[in-house]
Image (cartoon, coloured by chain):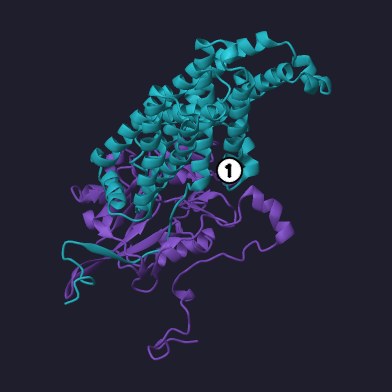
Chain colours: A cyan, B purple
Amino acid sequence: MDHVSTIEATKAVVTLDVALPGIIWGWMITLNMWAKSIGTGVVLVGAYLLMKYKHEDMPNLRWMMPLLSFIALNVFLLFTLVDLHQPLRMVNIFLHPHWTSAITVGAWMASLFTGLITLMLAIAAANHFSDFQRHNGILKALRGKNDLYEKVFPFVVFLAFPVTMYTAIIMAQSSARELWAAPAEVIQMLLAAFMVGSASLLLIAEKWSKEVRRDLAFVLMFSVLFSFLMYMGEYFFSYKAAEVEATLAYIHSGGSYNVQFWTAMILGYIIPFFIAMGSIKEENRTMMKFAAVTTLIGLYLAKSTWLEIPQMIPLS
Amino acid sequence: MKLGFLVDLNLCMGCKGCEIACKVENEVPLSSWRLRVKYIDIGTFPDTSRSFTPLRCNHCENAPCERICPVSALHYLDNGIVNIDSSRCIGCAGCMMACPYGAIYMDPESNTADKCTYCAHRIEGGLMPACVVACPVEANIFGDIEDNTSHISRYITEHQGNVQVRKPEKHTDPKHYYVGGGNQTLNPLAHERIEGYGLFNNITHLDTLGDPHHSILDRFLTPIFGGHNDHLKNESFVDMPNDVEGHKEEGGHH
């Protein structure tokens, strides 16, 4: 008897049905989340450094922080728009907002955040590049507005927290995907911001003081450690709901997502943790840059896996 | 008034008349379904049985799709129907991620989310939903569940203890009931969905969601490079290659 083709008496099989959607939110949403983590993470980690250290310890941070954030936020906004099936109707979120939706609240907060970061970047760039502002009326007007930069900055830091975390609420409102539990995702989003925020700043920290780079290594080490521990907890012990069990059984059984998940854990968490720990004892700039790059790659892969696997089980 | 739906699975014979009526009435495009009838085989040959489960939007009183929609394209009507305004939809697919019943699809022609509306347009005109009219055995029962004298209310009362909803643990409070359902028919995790050719068609996943060239980049690039719908695939039994060995011998036509 061919055991492979035998239907077990206790099991039922679908013999006629329509084609179901596969991945609904794919790589563009992964990229969206990843870029947003960078955009808010550099502000959160940057704020910590600006509060703790003198300007001379990291001379370019005041304009590099809003620049990195601005680039990342624009990648985030671009792919948010591109992923829509009716991108030109994005304006409806502002004209007909539905405030129970985390998508609406998030879009408003992220737009405000991007606007304020743009303002900070313009002020910082006007001050840093004196030639630049000579040819541009707006930048000329912003030159010397350091007090405005200082006034806006605390509000931007405050706003960076909900902007980082609102995607977790969208995932919580996605009732069909039980793997995305709100408390865990909120913390994971926050840790992701600190991971890639410190990693991104490490890449531009060549001329900063040794103490600053050491602090960045600390932030990176602790954020990857706690995020890794949370993933392990979710991966091995999240057996509470039937659909979560089915999702985890799917990834535990092997296949491409299993490989992707463990690649993400090694690149994004295990390698940077040990390099950062080693670099705190004895600094190695090249290795820290390597750790920063693997963190950025690993986080993308981890986000991609966690976003896509719960979409693989049939809902009906 | 609170409109509800009830399907007596003991009566349903899987004719798919409701499915076709829905397709025609609402001009549902290829690869999209507002209502579908799923066949499930249970047991080992020769002790097997086949069950049929019509699946459509549950019109939940606490609808996750309505809550997550950023522009109120999904909204409640006074009669309890969860309706959709396609002209407002931005196509974010948030509702598809929120609906625990997989009842929402992305229309490949309009690039907006769509779903069963209990034929709200027909109800407004005093007609029954198309699927109710088409059912030859009156397995679909539709009406006001707040009216104790309505057919659906009396049916629910008569079958107390045997009336179920899908995924009650989600607390969505569905207004779509089943009589004669069981774990195998109502729980998608209780049966296997094996990819490949089943009874008549290829059980698979959609290659794309909505129009494969929906993105804003495509809209800019299409006029230059063309080929807007070149790669649309709707794999079903009609797409089976005609040169399959033995196809003609088995009564197939070219």
In front here: A172 or A18?
A172
At horizontal 40% and vertical 45% (from top left) the residue drawn is A305
Query: In the rendered view, would you say A228 is above or below B127?
Result: above
Which kind of residue does numbered mark 1 sit on?
A: Ile
Quarter assignment of residue B213: bottom right
Q: For numbered disc 1, what is the local secondary structure?
A: loop
Closer to us: B27 or B217: B217
Percent across and percent down for residue A146 are 67, 10
Where A60 falls versus B90 (above or below)? Answer: above
Horizontal arrangement in the rendering, residue A141 relative to residue B123 (left or right): right
Quadrant placement of the N terminus of chain A: bottom left
Residue farthest bottom in this picture? B249
Residue at the top extreme?
Answer: A147
Residue A111 visible from this viewpoint: no
Crowding around mark 1 (Cα neighbors within 10 Å: few <14, some 14 to 19, many 20+) is many
Residue for point 50% across, 47% down: A27
Q: How far across and how far down the image is residue B22, in percent?
A: 46, 61
Q: Residue at x 48, y 74 (%)?
A: B239
Q: Where does the image place residue A176, in percent across and percent down from the top left?
A: 37, 44
Chain letter of the residue beneath label 1 in the structure image: B
User: Visible in this render: residue A45?
Assistant: yes
List the residue tagged with mark 1. Answer: B90
Side of B144 relative to A142 (left or right): left
In the rendered image of this protein, does residue B106 appear above or below residue A19? above
